[in-house]
Amino acid sequence: MNRYAIENLFGIEGLNIAWYGIIIACGMVLGFALAICRCRKTGINKEHIYNLALWLIPVCIICARAYYVIFEWDNYKNDLISVFEINRGGLAIYGGVLGGVAVALIYCKVKRISFWSLADTLMPSLVLGQAIGRWGNFVNQEAYGNQITNPSLCFFPYGVYIEEIGQWRQATFFYESALNLALLTAMLICYPHFRRKGYLLPFYMIGYGTIRFFVEGLRSDSLYLLPGICVSQALSGCLIILGIVILFIIRKRQAVRQ
């Protein structure tokens, strides 16, 4: 599949619109729409979502790219211009999440609104965006898993054929996308039954951390902190632990108020 939906836009050589960018943009738009729909349930003014989006989108993209480039610096140090070529792929979701949380915390502090209510509003949107964004990996033929040697297993969605290396590989991008949709469904179903604000934040951290830890163990193109130590699995473990800590903090704060 051609990576570009439109090549040489307006007749300008090299001005291309990549499917990867279109898919990411669709994830952002649908995530934004979901957040707006959830404002009524969480008590957040819609204007805050509009204002926050102006900061979240650029910061998350920059942080997601920076995270990826830092751990893949050997591939960019001799060609610094390629650092900005995000149309070729190379966005790490953990970088985007860290940047997004920082922006949300600062925004809530400045505007004096509840961070927990904002988290309940935005977490489902984040999961939806991740589920959609993973299909950008399909187009770019990246984020795949181990080689499939059994011919009977060479079919989608279990596997995906990678043209560059001429092999069938586990479709780990699809595994994560499907599991994220399952996580999103669980979040939306469980939320009305929560008696405390902010539960969707640890719900996401524990849920996505578990998903990513599992999927990352199947991938063959993971970023490594040290030989044998996968960065994303280490961060996933930290995310799960932090999610459990935040869960207890929320319960304790509510118990004190009661």
Image (tube, rainbow, N blue to C red):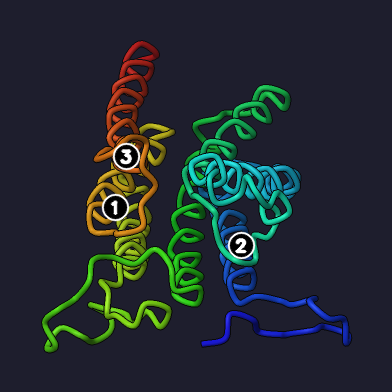
The three-letter amino acid code for the residue at tag 1 is: Glu
Residue 174 in the image: state x and y as whole percent.
34, 70
Q: Secondary structure at mark 3?
A: helix
Of residues 129 and 152, the one drawn nearer to the viewer in this rendering: 152
Mark 2 and mark 1 lie on one chain; the one further toward the N terminus is: 2
User: Residue drawn 33% across and 48% down?
Assistant: 208
Of residues 74 and 45, the one drawn nearer to the viewer in this rendering: 74
State the residue position of label 3. 236
Left or right? Give the position of 147 relative to 176: left
Q: In the image as oriented, which residue stretches furthest toward the front? A: 78
User: Residue drawn 48% across and 49% down?
Assistant: 93
User: Residue drawn 50% across and 50% down?
Assistant: 92
Query: Which marked residue is nearer to the observer: mark 1 or mark 3?
Result: 1
User: Residue drawn 27% across and 38% down?
Assistant: 229
Rendered view: 214 above or below 120: below
- Which quadrant of the figure has residue 155? bottom left
Neighbourhood count class around disc 2 (C-alpha, 10 Å): few under 14, some 14–19, many 20 upward: few
Of residues 60 and 192, the one drawn nearer to the viewer in this rendering: 60
Q: Secondary structure at mark 2?
A: helix
State the residue position of label 2. 33
Query: Which marked residue is nearer to the observer: mark 3 or mark 2?
Result: 3
Neighbourhood count class around disc 3 (C-alpha, 10 Å): few under 14, some 14–19, many 20 upward: many
Residue 72 in the image: state x and y as whole percent.
50, 46
The three-letter amino acid code for the residue at tag 3 is: Ser
The three-letter amino acid code for the residue at tag 2 is: Ala
Mark 1 and mark 3 lie on one chain; the one further toward the N terminus is: 1
Q: In the image as oriented, which residue stretches furthest toward the top? A: 256
Rendered view: 63 above or below 250: below
Real-space CA distance between mark 3 and mark 2, rounded to the nearest whole angstrom: 28 Å
State the residue position of label 1. 216
How many callouts does the rendering have? 3
Rendered view: 5 above or below 195: below
